[in-house]
Image (cartoon, grey):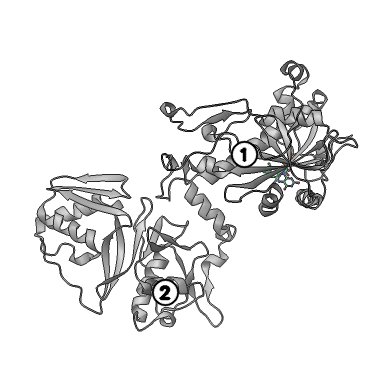
Amino acid sequence: MTTVNVTPRGSLTEATALRQGVLCEHRDSTVLLSLRNQTGYRLRGVTPGILGVLERLSRHAVPTDELAAGLDAYQERQLTRVLERISPFLARSLMYRGAELMAVEATAPAEPYDVVDVPTDTPVRLSKFALLRRREGALVVETPLTAYRCVLRSAEAASVASALGETATALELASAELPAEAVAAVLGHLVGAGFADLGTRGDGPAVFAADDDEVLRQWDFHDLYFHSRSRLGRTDEPYGGRFPYIGSIEPLPPVKPAPPGEPIPLFRPQLTDVLAKDPSLLAVMEGRQSIRSYGERPIDAEQLGEFLYRAARVRGTYGPRPDQKMPYAGSTRPYPCGGAAYELELYLTIRRCDGIEPGIYHYDAQDHCLRLVNADPGLRQNLLDLGSLSTGGEAVPDVLITMTSRFQRLSWKYQSIAYAVTLKHVGVLYQTLYLVATAMGLAACGLGSGNSELAERAFGLDPLKESAIGEFLLGSAPQTRPLEESARHATDWRPGNDPQWQQEVRHLLP
Ligand SMILES: Cc1cc2nc3c(=O)[nH]c(=O)nc-3n(C[C@H](O)[C@H](O)[C@H](O)COP(=O)(O)O)c2cc1C
């Protein structure tokens, strides 16, 4: 076993450590490194000298310039090669007085960052995109801006990071435990790896380059974090269809159990009737437009039944089929859905519909019926008003369709991407609703925002299990369709590719 040099007290040292969640085991001369018991990397023929280094690393961070202590020149070269090969399992650590302050690990293959020289009187603050959270038993700082995670392995480093909610200098953050030079070293890593911003101070308040960056300014924190964590490239979290709860949690059923209440059966169209009257795909695609005005006569129950039947009914259910990577039951419906999970539910807030009373209803896609879930006229009006507000007050729709997601249908299978996938499904369903509405001569308009809390209250939902993620307006078509061609008479109109198709198919639509 190699002799371990003890870092002299009072010194600040760059060190090497195993990253969070890495297990380093060996049998004879074979070493197995694994990350959270998943990614395995085997090193064979490891010599006792190198084994000693790895054993030390598996216990604690080791000052980088002491890693090769006791090794001869040949072993030192060997160690350099080994460290290069196992670099995805290593973190860059900072020690003070022999104890580890913090470690920065790469969450994806990344060029090593440069530690920034932070003078002790220079202002620093946490980046707008930085996030402090508990992960695997430690406080970590993350950012979607770079492929690094900082593990705060000491109260002193945690205190520095958490103080950066306000702009501060190393001198201001210095304490009896951590003098200004050591704070500046922590800041040097935080700034270097992209967790914190380095400012300049003239006569006035500190100035930060990020505040003038037009691209960064236009990103919301949660959008950029969501993007970086739901796509491959920067994340090291488990990703994709991995079925993490199989065997421990039962999957949700493919169709939501019907809420209590009397079913109101809906009209079921006949295929031959629809085939006989339906316009072509081209006419529907080209003629589709968002319509925010409605006819004098409202949509009727037959139209609503046909619309829902064609766009969103359950054609059937099947499974589980474990032999086909489908250890849960799925369903088939007219629109596509990742993993055939069909987690989206439709709730209809009806203002006016010939043949159906105003109210808040759940659409049962299996039995093709509605059930009243809330008769409160105040909540109904609140939902409709909000839908209207999303169009700047222009639309007073016959029906507001709210899409909710039964999240666990997706997260039982997918890791990191479940929410991103459900949002994609909302887009898929929007277009399906638009197309069916256009084919049927109804007025349709997708909405970009909504109040999930209001919807949960109105529909009686547990928000962690099912919550609103999309809104869509539907109604009878107005006497005259809004003229999209009016845009073409405007002075700023610039024709692109066959814009006249939209008008030329008009006579083919109902
Ligand atoms: C996801 C999505 C969100 C939308 N949000 C709104 C909205 O909140 N309010 C609104 O009046 N229209 C909304 N629309 C309709 C768009 O304004 C419309 O699709 C766009 O102007 C193009 O016009 P067209 O649909 O008539 O071709 C939305 C459409 C989509 C697909």
Answer left or right for 298 relative to 263.
right
Q: Position of residue 118 (x, y in %)?
A: 39, 74
Q: Quadrant of the C terminus?
A: top right
SS label for mark 1:
strand
Task: Pick whichever, 214 or 109, lies toward us.
Answer: 109
Between discs 2 and 1, the one toward the N terminus: 2
Q: Amino acid at mark 2?
A: Ser
Q: What residue is shown with label 2?
A: 159
Tell me which amino acid carries mark 1: Leu
Q: Which residue is at a point 21% across and 51% down the rendered structure image? A: 25
Instruction: Give the position of the N terminus as an image quadrant.
Output: bottom left
- The secondary structure type at the circle numbered 2 is helix
Whole-percent x, y for residue 132 in the image: 46, 64
Q: Nearer the viewer, residue 467 or 108?
A: 467
The residue pinned by badge 1 equals 344
Q: Position of residue 46 (x, y in %)?
A: 14, 49
Q: Position of residue 417 (x, y in %)?
A: 50, 44
Question: At 39% across and 65% down in the image, what residue appears?
Answer: 192
